[in-house]
Image: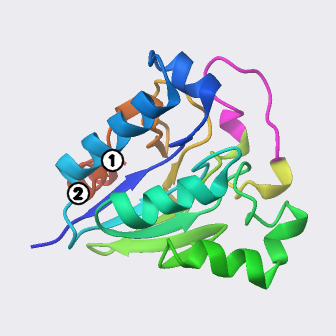
Amino acid sequence: MSTVFFTADLHLGHKRVSELRGFKSIEEHDAHIISVWNSRVTKRDTVYVLGDIAVSNYENALDIIKNQLNGAKHLISGNHDIVHPMHKKGHSRAELLKWLDSFETVNPYLRKTNNHRSFLLSHFPYESWGDGEKRAGSRYNQYRLPNTGTPLIHGHTHGTERTHGNMLHVGWDAWGEPVNINFIEGWLDTL
């Protein structure tokens, strides 16, 4: 039996994020993510990665995603992913094909339905949440979806908050693992 997971902000190969997460090295950080991911996700499962796989050295991050992480992976691109429409290379067929070698699909956002409940997937929270609980204001407003009441699953903030209003933050900093669809279904039932 397969299941669906959601996560965001892996930041593979990112020295500063590795340090903030308490790791002594990038290698230790990335090995931890690989270990935790593969202990939860099987090869039959599906994972939606809601942006920011890395901030540089994308080739290494894409190699890890393709060859070391279980499951079929789908990317909702984030501000650090060069295939997001905000970047000049985001429209490059050659660049997109590199990313599609590691991901089944690459999109800036998606609408999903599960058990007759619709929700949106985006790297960014709605503008009303800004960049998270500790940051005032919003960046990238032109790339944020409008809050029309539809539940939103997002990343981006690097905060520890998980739920806030009709938004659910699935970032690695909040969960330390991919979030199972069973939790998402339970959360949707509370709205």
Magenta span: helix, strand or loop, mainly?
A: loop
Q: Secondary structure at mark 2?
A: loop
Q: Residue at x 44, y 73 (%)?
A: 112
Hey, which quadrant is residue 92 in on the image?
bottom right
Can residue 148 be seen? no
Seen in the image, is 51 located left or right of residue 28? right
Q: In which quarter of the view is residue 175 placed?
A: top left
Residue 124 in sight here: yes
- Label 2 amino acid? Val
The answer for how far apart the CA atoms under marks 1 and 2 are is 8 Å
Q: Position of residue 160 (x, y in %)?
A: 46, 24
Checking the image for residue 121, the label placed there is none
Which of the two marks, 1 or 2, is nearer to us in this view?
2
| Residue 150 position within the rendered picture, expressed as x and y whole percent measured from the top left | 53, 60
Q: Residues within 10 Å of mark 2 (few under 14, many from 20)?
A: many
Residue flagged by tag 1: what amino acid is it?
A: Pro
Q: Residue at x 64, y 61 (%)?
A: 77
In this view, the residue farthest toward the right is 88
Q: Is residue 45 left or right of residue 93?
A: left
Confirm or deny contact between disc 1 and disc 2 (CB under 8 A): yes
Q: Earlier in the sequence, mark 1 or mark 2?
A: 2
Where disc 1 sits, the SS reads: loop
Residue bearing mark 1: 178
Tell which of 80 and 152 is nearer to you. Answer: 80
- Percent across and percent down for residue 101 are 53, 78
Q: Which residue is mark 2?
A: 41
Q: Assess whether residue 138 is covered by the magenta stretch.
A: yes
How many numbered marks are there? 2
Q: Which residue is pictured at 48% across the width and 39% down the height?
A: 171
Residues rendered magenta in the picture: 128-140
- Name the image quarter holding residue 132: top right
Side (left or right) of 66 relative to 94: left
